Amino acid sequence: MEAFREARGEIYLRVSAILVLVLTALLVAFDSQTKVILYALTKKATYHDLEALKILVSVTSAAAVLNLLQICKLIFFVPTFSGGKSNGHYLLYLAWLCFLLDQVGMYVTFAVNSAAVEAATIALNGVKAMLWMKVCNKFTRFCVQMGVALLCGYVASLVMAIISCVSAYNLFRLYSSSSFLRLKPRPLIN
């Protein structure tokens, strides 16, 4: 139970990351706007129109699942290792795996969100040299809601960066400060 109390701050961070990631995915996935172009001809703008937005929904959903699995690890898995009966190497391997997964999740989420911002900027401004016309002057509500979703994506990336720092701290506190890449000696438990 003490391991759970130590990880409470990390759990709160991960829950907030999950909430913002799910909010981003839902805002992008359920955003649509239909406009009448001619009398019977309509055009519907959805996230399926841009490949970057489809990838954004997938990646933010996967990052939310990753954080949910990390919460399950903190609640159910780590307390069994911190009782002193297990080998310290298992805890080290688990810390390295969590650190690497957090790093990958943070960087991929940030990269996909940045790619979606670039695609949204092209939809907002158009590119005359390539004859790409502006889309946001016709689908204003769609573009505003997409902008809010992308802002939420950057907030999620920031929260995941903080989580990566916590994960790095949890990993590197297992190493000795006096010897290079040596584990701290585990205290003997009677």
Image (spheres, helix red, strand yellow):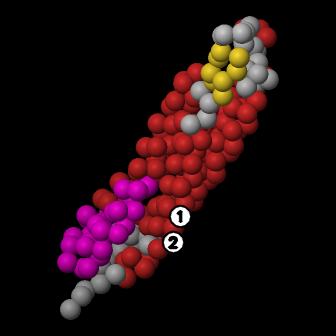
Q: Amino acid at mark 2?
A: Gly
Could you tell whether 183 is left or right of 131 in the image?
left
| Residue that mark 2 sits on | 9
Of 156 and 43, nearer the camera is 43
145 vs 181: above or below: above
- Seen at 26% across and 72% down, the residue is 81
- Contact? badges 2 and 1 (CB < 8 Å): yes
Quadrant in which the C terminus is drawn: bottom left
The image position of residue 32, as x and y in percent, is 62, 30
Q: Secondary structure at mark 2?
A: helix
Percent coordinates x, y for residue 16 in the rendering:
55, 60
Q: Amino acid at mark 1?
A: Leu
User: For the N terminus, which image quadrant?
Assistant: bottom left
Horizontal arrangement in the rendering, residue 94 relative to residue 21 (left or right): left
Quadrant of the rendered image containing residue 134: top right
Which range is magenta? Answer: 67-92
Q: Which residue is mark 1?
A: 13
Residue found 54% across the figure and 24% down from its top: 48
